[in-house]
Image (cartoon, rainbow, N blue to C red):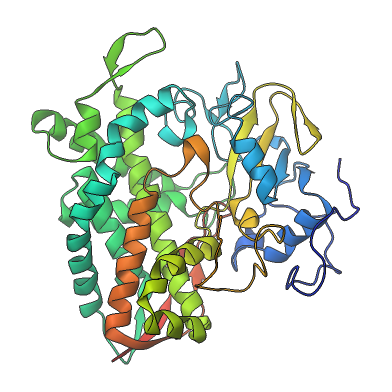
């Protein structure tokens, strides 16, 4: 099913910075998490974009469920799939027992079809409308001053002139505090939630489709906390996103209005803790690392703060915090002319699309002035990230605070990453901050 002839695309020295001559797709295993241990394997996906943009991944010893899946790596093809949710579902195939947006099947009616990001319209949009006001422009404008003050306080607490962990001390804090505000979580509880979230997302000591004692205990602790918090919101609702969901009724497929079920509320809480803070913290950490590794780009935004919005977009493209999402074919169809059968798993590699030579000039060049920059770090169409503008705001105010306080930042050692093919996860990032 793999066409090994190069497919049309730009040629010449600006097409790609990667040498593809020694790469072979024969033994490629995207479910072997060791492949992602040092970060996203750009060379592998450059090869896929060039030779097999819609590629069938045979199951390996690492592949959950023992079934293969399609790998979609080009920007245009990813958009084609996401723009057709009737054919490519976030829930699963008709009648299937499992589905969702991970490579491994999750039980339908427990995760798939219940989690907001693993549900299809119209239910997805009905729930989404309930929480959109919390991240609407007016709400974010009201939050900006608070987020700016929090960014300053976070950085003022960091040591200077000595090695410190930027991930733990800075990148984790602002997204975690913002998520706690949105959900009405007491600030003193936020670090427990982050520890539980980290344990459930980390694949250290386990493979895809497997669990671990630490992950199970963390999931149980988060569920118990979420249950108690939801009940507290029922008794005394606040001005927060979780309270809005707890008190709302949603139209069902039968046309009747009903409150959201306990499981859906719990799943929403867990999703926001993980997705609402984890992805933004990685964008902040890896974005700052990119600026450190490209000091000319740091100098540009330092000299011209009007470049901050485009710098934020380039950071999002460059870091691509969510590496892939999955869809399931609900019927026979095609992607870029390649036949796909009902029930097939289809993985959309956002990080690859964000480096597509057909869309981005010299994609492996970090350029804070890049324009246009049609990255898909937040997804596309109906599942475009609910918190996209909040994430942009958090990254921007943190960059502003960094530029105000520090003349330079240096990496003091290798970045330690989570072992996962799902997120650009950072565990530790040692730096030295040099004050102005």
Residue 230: name its quadrant: top left
Q: In this view, does 227 lie to the left or right of 392?
A: left
- Specify the farthest residue to the right: 5
Residue at 81% in and 35% down: 337
Q: How many numbered badges does the structure rendering display? A: 0
Nearer to us in this view, 393 or 54: 393
Nearest the camera: 60 or 232? Answer: 232
Q: Where is residue 386 in the image (x, y as percent from the top left)?
A: 38, 43
In the displayed structure image, the side of residue 178 where residue 343 appears, left or right: right
The C terminus appears in which quarter of the rendering?
Answer: bottom left
Q: Residue 298: x, y in percent?
A: 44, 82
Q: Quadrant of residue 136?
A: top left
Q: Of 434 and 58, which appears nearest the observer?
A: 434
Q: Where residue 205 sits in the image (x, y, percent)?
A: 54, 56
Residue 154 seen: yes
- Residue 214 in view here: no
Image-quadrant location for residue 96: top right
Residue depicted at 50% across the width and 44% down the height? 211
Percent position (x, y) of residue 14?
A: 74, 72
266 versus 148 height, above or below:
above
The quadrant of the picture occupied by the N terminus is top right
In this image, 231 relative to 350: left or right? left
Residue at 62% over, 61% down: 36
């Amino acid at each position: 099913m793999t066409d090994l002839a190069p497919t049309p695309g730009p040629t010449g020295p600006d097409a790609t910075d990667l040498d593809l001559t020694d790469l072979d797709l024969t033994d490629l295993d995207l479910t072997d998490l060791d492949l992602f241990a040092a970060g996203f394997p750009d060379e592998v996906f450059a090869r896929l974009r060039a030779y097999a943009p819609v590629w069938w991944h045979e199951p390996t010893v690492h592949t959950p469920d023992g079934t293969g899946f399609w790998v979609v790596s080009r920007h245009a093809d990813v958009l084609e799939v996401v723009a057709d949710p009737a054919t490519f579902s976030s829930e699963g195939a008709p009648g299937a027992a499992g589905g969702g947006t991970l490579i491994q099947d999750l039980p339908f009616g427990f995760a798939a079809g219940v989690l907001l990001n693993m549900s299809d319209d119209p239910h997805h949009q009905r729930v989404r409308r309930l929480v959109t006001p919390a991240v609407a422009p007016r709400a974010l404008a009201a939050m900006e001053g608070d987020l700016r003050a929090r960014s300053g306080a976070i950085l003022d607490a960091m040591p200077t002139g000595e090695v410190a962990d930027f991930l733990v001390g800075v990148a984790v804090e602002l997204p975690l505090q913002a998520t706690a505000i949105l959900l009405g979580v007491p600030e003193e509880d936020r670090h427990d939630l982050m520890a539980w979230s980290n344990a459930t997302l980390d694949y250290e000591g386990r493979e895809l489709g497997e669990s671990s004692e630490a992950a199970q205990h963390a999931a149980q602790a988060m569920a118990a906390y979420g249950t108690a918090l939801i009940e507290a919101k029922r008794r005394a609702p606040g001005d927060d996103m979780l309270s809005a969901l707890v008190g709302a009724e949603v139209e069902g497929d039968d046309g009747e209005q009903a409150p959201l079920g306990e499981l859906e509320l719990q799943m929403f809480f867990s999703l926001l803790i993980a997705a609402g803070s984890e992805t933004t913290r990685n964008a902040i950490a890896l974005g700052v690392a990119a600026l450190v590794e490209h000091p000319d780009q740091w100098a540009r935004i330092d000299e011209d703060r009007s470049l901050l919005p485009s710098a934020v977009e380039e950071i999002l493209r460059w870091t691509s915090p969510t590496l892939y999402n999955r869809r399931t074919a609900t019927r026979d169809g095609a992607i870029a002319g390649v036949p796909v059968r009902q029930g097939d798993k289809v993985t959309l590699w956002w990080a690859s699309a964000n480096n597509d030579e057909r869309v981005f000039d010299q994609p492996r060049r970090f350029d804070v002035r890049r324009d246009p920059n049609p990255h898909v770090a937040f997804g596309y169409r109906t599942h475009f990230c609910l918190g996209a503008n909040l994430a942009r705001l958090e990254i921007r105010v943190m960059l502003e605070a960094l530029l105000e306080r520090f003349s330079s930042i240096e990496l003091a050692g290798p970045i330690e990453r989570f072992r996962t093919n799902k997120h650009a996860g950072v565990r530790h990032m040692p730096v030295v901050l040099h004050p102005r």
